[in-house]
Image (tube, helix red, strand yellow):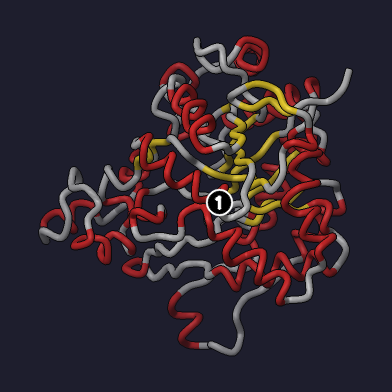
Amino acid sequence: MSLKIMTVCGPIAPEELGFTSMHEHIFSDCSMFRHRVRRIGVARDRGLVHPDEKLTLENRSFLRHNIALSADNMKLDDEQLMIAEITEFRQGGGSAILEVSAPGIRSAAEDVFALRRISSASGVHIIASTGLYAEYTWPQQYRTMTYEEYVRFLRHEINHGIGDTGILPGHIKAAYEVYTEQLESYLRAAAFVAGETGMSLQVHLGLDLSPEEVRLNVVRSLLEGGCIPERTILCHIQLLLGFLTLEELVGNPGRIPFDIQLHRELLQQGFVLSFTPFGFEADDEPLGMVQYPDWYALSGLVALIKEGYAEQLVIGNDVFTKLATRRGGGEGYRRLTDFVIPALKQCGVTERQIRQLIIENPARLLAF
């Protein structure tokens, strides 16, 4: 049987995929992040922004440094806006998007119907995901499942469709932020089902993880669960180049932290690494955390390409707020086409290596 890629509009051949962003959100709800922001009460008391306030030109500057304070900003829920945004991605040269929203940051299974309509209207292939996001976001029914129940959940969606929609996923999503035995049970189940079906698996890596935690808790769980490293994507990998704080950058500007030893280890084990986000302008300056600029992510990406790992690397914009869309004043889904690819060429990356990054690797990973 020939391999296929399952999109929200049905299966396509791998050669039809084209330029693919391998980590995006198109219809999602990340408003639960607000519960993790310590300054919500302070900001409300100061009258800076009301939690129910919509993103506007007047409050955009404040929200750039406090993105989660507006619940509206954290939701991608405007179908017409997303059609316009995704159409611009196609006009810039993009062809396909892996949509990695899952329970926890997906409002409802029915969101995939909107993905299908957006795909049809924009002409961009969209691949939806089964699986789960970070444990603290899980709806109640997933919080006490056994390993066997997670396996059945994933198998059912892969074979019958996401929720009751009948729309089949083309990818499995997982996320690691803090270790728990419950999370390990899900990671092992996702790894097993990915290995069993040949479907690709992508694991979100959270902030502030140490290399040792990635080795002991993420990689160990995946390998013991039965994942195929060559079909397992570890994303937000530039966060592990080094932790950037305002004090360190100002106090010692000549020594920006940069370490790709863990990246080499993961690649040598066969894993695929995803550099994402690009074009993300928000930060958390009030807590001393600064954004990871695109040039910093590019430095790690280019270094690994030049070491010969181009066939194990992918990229994505990771749009997940209204502020990040073009109509919200951000870069939208065009940062890859308009900046990242030209910058890679400027830095000496070859056309062949770029083709691997945005066309060949995604097609290989998403075909099963």
Residue 180 at what x, y percent from top left? 56, 35
Q: Secondary structure at mark 1?
A: helix
Depth check: 16 or 283 in front? 16
Question: Considering the image in quadrants, where does the N terminus appear?
Answer: top right
Categorize mark 1 by other alpha carbons within 10 Å: few (<14), some (14-19), many (20+).
Answer: some
Q: Is residue 219 visible?
A: yes
* Residue 28, position as x, y percentages in the image: 42, 36
The residue beneath circle 1 is 91
x 66%, y 53%: residue: 315
Determine the image quadrant of residue 34: top left
The residue lying at 78 percent from left, 69 percent from top is 349
Relative to 90, residue 124 above or below: above
**Of residues 260 and 310, the one drawn nearer to the viewer in this rendering:** 310
Quick one: quadrant of the C terminus? top right
**Left or right: 265 as drawn, with respect to 292:** right
Measured as percent of width and height from the top left, residue 76 is found at 38, 40
